[in-house]
Image (cartoon, coloured by chain):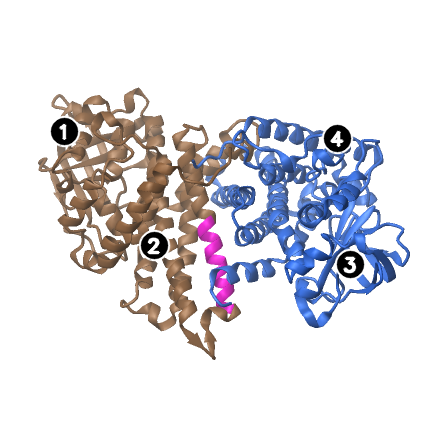
Amino acid sequence: MIDFELSDSQKNIREMVRWFAREEVRPLALESDKAHTVPLEFLKKSMQLGLGSGTRPKALGGDGEGAGEERDAKGTKQGNRVSIILGEEIAWGDPAVVLTFPGPGLGGPPVQFTGTAEQKSRAFGIFKNDGVPRWGAYALTEPAAGSDVAGIQATARKDGNHYILNGRKCYITNGARATWNVVFATVDKSQGRAGHRAFLVFKGTPGFSVGKIEDKLGLRASETAELVFEDCKVHVDDLLGGEEHYDKGAKGGFTTAMKTFDSTRPMVAAMAVGIARAAYDVVHDHIRENYLLSRPIARYHVLAELIANMERKIAAARLMCWRAAWMADEGIPNSKEASMSKAYAAQVASWVCQEAIGLMGHLGTYHANLVEKLYRDVKVYDIFEGTGQVQRIVISRRLLKGL
Amino acid sequence: MISFEPSDDEKEILKTVERFAEVEVRATMRDIEAAGRPPEELRRKYHEMGLGMLNYPETVGGSGMGQVTRALIEEALSFGDPGAAIGLDGPGLAGLAILELGEGAHDERYLAPFAGPDAHLRTAALALLEPKPVADWCSLATHARETAAGYLLDGAKSFVVNGADADFYVVFASFDPAKGWDGLAAFVVEKGTPGVTVTEPILTCGLNGVPIVDLTLDGVVVPKAARLSGRGDFAGGFRRFLARARVVNAARIVGLSRAACEYAIRYAEERTAFGKPIGHHQGLSWMIADIATEVDAARWMVWKAAWEVDHARPSAERASIQALVQANEMAKKVTNDGVQVLGGAGFIRDYPVEKWYRDARTLAFVLGTDPMDNSRAATLTFTSDGESPLDSLSCV
């Protein structure tokens, strides 16, 4: 039955996260943007709440029910729906701080989808309830291959019981401080996608080093690192999914990269919705306090139109995320809808932030104003996890046969 | 629990309606357009399928289904043809006005016949809009005055959809524009009432599968019992009626836009230029990706608004406005791009896309204009409690 009501447990989780976003995350937003980091105390608090442990199954050392495992009474998975609800709330608090939460991060889904039991246990086992923040990360993008994932240049050469990795990865969120990275490389460029392999590379592996930490337009509280692999020796046990994963499906590595997107794109889209909502709230208060005076806001038609349209588009973007996440939970192929949600929400959020600054005029450009920061932060939401243009390629390929 | 899956009952009905829309409606839509209304035979079939009174209570012979089901079905019918969808809908939006504003006696007298054996011969029409633009519904120029004999109505109504031979009209008028929403009232004006002049069907841009007329009310006297008073809360009932009507209209807009989008996709796969299907050129493939995304976004907004109406959410009125504005904005883009994809062929009446291009822009005004709705939405935003309206909108 068509329904838009959250379950009671979803409402409870949302209320908790909303509270955390308002009381703990938002107060850090401007300060952490300047400091390029968040306080350790905050990370510990977020760990106590279990945030960031989204795909950590209980059986593998998680200290609580992982959100990815939540099921309803009929046994249908709710994980994707829970994740997008949380993602929106936390990003409302701050879209950069949300990326600093300890946990497997974007590295979680590929390990979850294709890792062997032993690999899952090693990768997820590091997230202990000991108050020490740890991260996983996802290293796909390269200096010469961003959107065109199939064109990665990093190489993996088999040498006995090891693979030798060479190449560079860039723009990797939490890549430097991560305990492990899921690193994509090719064993044979001529094979294209079929040559792709994914590896679990642990920090400290000889030949693996961190290059520069990027200085960015926005999301400045989040660490974005360059990773360098020079004859980096990785044991075959760290080939994600084992050799057989790549034998049975010719494009095992590429599929791992793509399958991740079906869950993460709606999640990133939901974060964009959270950013848009944050900017909208600032503007809403600003208008109520400054422009409203004794006249109903609707008398100012330019404002009425803008406010009504902002609210409407944010609501529409949210439903696009819900739709894609619902499909993922139900096991319905959702690549098209995941891309739609991402393309749409990022576009809406960018527009809302631009107009929010516009509504506040020069005050909107001050660093002390949250919308100034959101305007910088939001831009990358139309870029990472696939640019808006890549989403359109994905969508159109699924609409038009033979494309 | 968030779910986008129709119930088993809804799926069953949809299967039948989709077939009807394709085989009976879409296949004959140019004939319906030429005739200016759906043929009697088609209307009979529609009523035999039990679609006419789907979301009316069982007490008047309806099926008692909710607004979500209604939205799904209107979307499917309008995928066949939006003009026909309206022309087939017996009580139309006037029926929804009686549902929200009438008393038991009104239901019995005006709604129940639409469940009867000759239902397919009956029509009713909503007379809400006027020739002069209004800033909001409070400033309607059609005037009502109480007299010893009943109520005296004077004024003019325009864009009365499916109003050519209506058995009755639901006419909205104002006792006193200074009293705002509380000065408004609605009346049932039956066919043949002296002083009512109905024009010939007006030539409009689109939506030609259903007759659209103007009305003049010159010293029209209706009995006291003809007043729809909203059971003591006219303003509340009027808002609930508008919410329901917007959902129906928005669902129809989504239906026709989905038709345009799917037609454009199939055409782009078959037509070749420069050695490949035109849909394989990125200029078109991205355009198609964008319109398909927009159709989805509006579709879920309509479903959500329908769901809010069914659950009597306080935010249902705002959700219905958002759904309608979203649908209109989407339809402008989608039907325009639909013609564009077909190029020269899109401009020719041998292909259906030019019709959807006209229909979309006509259907948009059945319940007034977007700026009017946006003003209302903004007012609601700033008169709600201190919470962010987006919190209350979707999640509580």
- Residue B317 appearing in the image: no
- Residue B250 appearing in the image: yes
Check disc 4 and report the residue beneath it: A63
Decide: few, some or many residues near mark 4? Use Cα within 10 Å; few <14, some 14-19, many ≥20: some
Q: Secondary structure at mark 4?
A: loop
Q: Colour of chain A?
A: blue
Q: Is residue A166 magenta?
A: no
Residue at 78% x, 64% y is A154
What is the magenta range?
B283-296
- Callout 2–callout 4 Cβ contact below 8 Å: no
On residue A110, which mark appears? none
Check disc 2 and report the residue beneath it: B361
- Callout 4–callout 3 Cβ contact below 8 Å: no
Check disc 1 and report the residue beneath it: B222
User: Residue B13 location, x and y as percent?
Assistant: 31, 41
Q: Mark 2 vs mark 1: tell me if same chain.
A: yes
For badge 4, the amino acid type reads: Asp
Q: Secondary structure at mark 2?
A: helix
Decide: few, some or many residues near mark 2? Use Cα within 10 Å; few <14, some 14-19, many ≥20: some
* Subunit of label 4: A
The residue mark sitting in front, 2 or 3, is 3
For badge 1, the amino acid type reads: Val
User: Residue B146 location, x and y as percent?
Assistant: 19, 24
Check disc 3 and report the residue beneath it: A170
Mark 4–mark 1 distance (CA, rounded to whole Å): 73 Å
| First in sequence: mark 2 vs mark 1 | 1
